Image (cartoon, grey):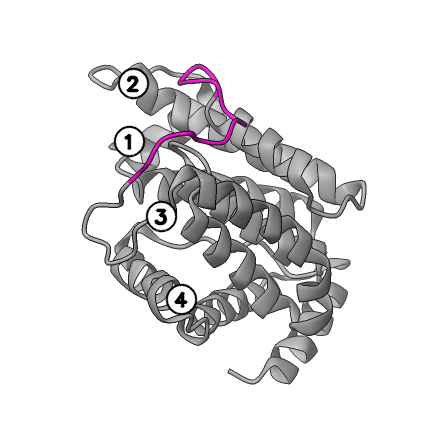
Amino acid sequence: MNYEDLRVKKALYQEHLKRVNAITLESYERAFEVAYTHNSTAIEGNTLTLLETKLVLEDGISIGGKTMRALYEVTNHHKAYQYVKACIAENKPLNEAIVKDIHAITMERIYTGGIYRNIDVYISGARHTPPAPNQMFTQVKSFYADLAWKEQEMNPIEYAAWTHAEFVKIHPFEDGNGRTSRLLMNYQLMANGFPAINIAKERRLQYFDTLEAYAVNGDLAPFCEMIAGLALEQMERYLGMRRG
């Protein structure tokens, strides 16, 4: 996908956003946050339905027959996304402290987050094995050092895709790396003027395949293409909203 076309679309999206009815915008973004939380947690195995996620987040209803972890995963994810938006509103560039905060919020009441793993981890069904702890520490430090120059070298879609793909390849935490990586990707998209995107659980196979292409072969292009397509779809949704 041609990035110049996305850049032009982004300018139209940003201008249109100023004129969308405030109630329309608020209701859409509330629905997006529920869907995003549902899909991001469902990709990792959470069994709450979209409606159940809505009831937990918007109505504060506890769902019978579901584990406390399942409930915490969706409430934590929603809280972490609010934190991401708050950081962006303050024009804070992504850094290690923010990443650790995002992970800590994501894992609240599940286990102590924001602490790098000191054990080996394996990913079921994947050809890529995350690095051993000593290698992981070196790689995660390089990741933060690379954030600044990668932003200068890549367009914003590539930069967001790389942030996600590289971070989840390193897998620095014992658990919650996928949810955290998707939040980091949306952090970079929103910080560069794009809307946040939602990867539907039904597309998880394509999603995992494109991440595997990067982890195993260093090929970021398939994942970039997926993210670019989702960003375009999201901007089109906003552009389709009537002005106030």
Quarter residue 95 falls in: top right
Q: Secondary structure at mark 4?
A: helix
Please state which of the two labelled residues, at mark 3 or mark 4, is closer to the viewer.
3
- x, y (%) of residue 229? 47, 71
Q: Which residue is mark 4?
A: 214
Can residue 126 be seen at all in this image of the molecule?
yes
Which of the two discs, 1 and 2, labels the residue nearer the N terminus? Answer: 1
Please say if the residues under marks 3 and 2 sit with CB atoms less than 8 Å apart.
no
- In the shown orientation, is residue 145 left or right of residue 53? right
Q: Secondary structure at mark 3?
A: loop
Q: Return the residue nearer the eye: 23 or 217.
A: 217
- At a point 41% along the width and 31% down the height, the residue shown is 54
Q: Which residue is mark 1?
A: 48
- In the shown orientation, is residue 64 left or right of residue 77? left
Q: CA separation, marks 3 and 4?
A: 13 Å
- At a point 24% along the width and 58% down the height, the residue shown is 127
- In the shown orientation, is residue 234 left or right of residue 21? left
- Indicate whether residue 119 is drawn in magenta: yes
Q: Which residue is mark 3?
A: 130
Q: Which SS type dominates the magenta stretch? A: loop
Q: Which residues are magenta?
A: 108-121
Please state which of the two labelled residues, at mark 3 or mark 1, is closer to the viewer.
3
Q: Amino acid at mark 4?
A: Tyr
Please say if the residues under marks 1 and 2 sit with CB atoms less than 8 Å apart.
yes
- x, y (%) of residue 41? 36, 38
Which of the two discs, 3 and 1, labels the residue nearer the N terminus? Answer: 1
Which of the two discs, 4 and 1, labels the residue nearer the N terminus? Answer: 1
Q: Which residue is mark 2?
A: 63
Q: Amino acid at mark 2?
A: Ile
Q: Amino acid at mark 1?
A: Leu
Q: Return the residue nearer the eye: 3 or 163.
A: 163
